[in-house]
Image (cartoon, rainbow, N blue to C red):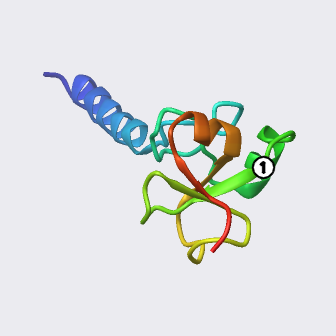
Amino acid sequence: MTAKSLKLLSYLAIAGAFTLAAPAVQAGSHGNGAAGGGFPQYRNLADAQKACARDTVVWGSSEHRGVFYVDGVGPQRIGGFYACMAVAQKAGMQIVTSN
């Protein structure tokens, strides 16, 4: 291999590493969370409020998968994702509305 070919390969390897490190989902109408579950989830409350304009925003704890809480209910918010309540219910998630 020539020096030029080796240099090109090293650039491609570095670019590939950055591509793998990029988040899989970008912010927008399809959610920006990566929690899975097959429905839109959001890392930021503002994004969820914008997407759920006519619905209640709920919060899902990373420690309690499949469970979402309305505002003021549930564990302390460390990690986790926001979602629209109707969408989360349709996806089979448990919604906790009171302590």
Name the residue: 65% across, 47% down: 83
Between 48 and 20, the residue placed more toward the observer is 48
Name the residue: 79% across, 41% down: 52
Name the residue: 29% across, 35% down: 13
Between 29 and 59, the residue placed more toward the observer is 59
Q: Residue 66 location, x and y as percent?
A: 46, 51
Q: Residue 62 location, x and y as percent?
A: 46, 61
Residue 97 higher or lower than 50, as above or below: below
Q: Is residue 40 visible?
A: no
> What SS does tag 1 mark?
loop
Q: Which residue is mark 1?
A: 56
Q: Amino acid at mark 1?
A: Thr
Dot 1, crowdedness within 10 Å: few (<14), some or many (≥20)?
Answer: some
Quadrant placement of the C terminus: bottom right
Which residue is outermost to the bottom? Answer: 76
Q: Is 43 on the left-hand or right-hand side of 52?
A: left
Q: Is residue 75 visible?
A: yes
Between 31 and 71, the residue placed more toward the observer is 71
Quadrant placement of the N terminus: top left
Quarter location, residue 76: bottom right
Q: Is 20 on the left-hand or right-hand side of 38?
A: left
Q: Is 5 on the left-hand or right-hand side of 11?
A: left
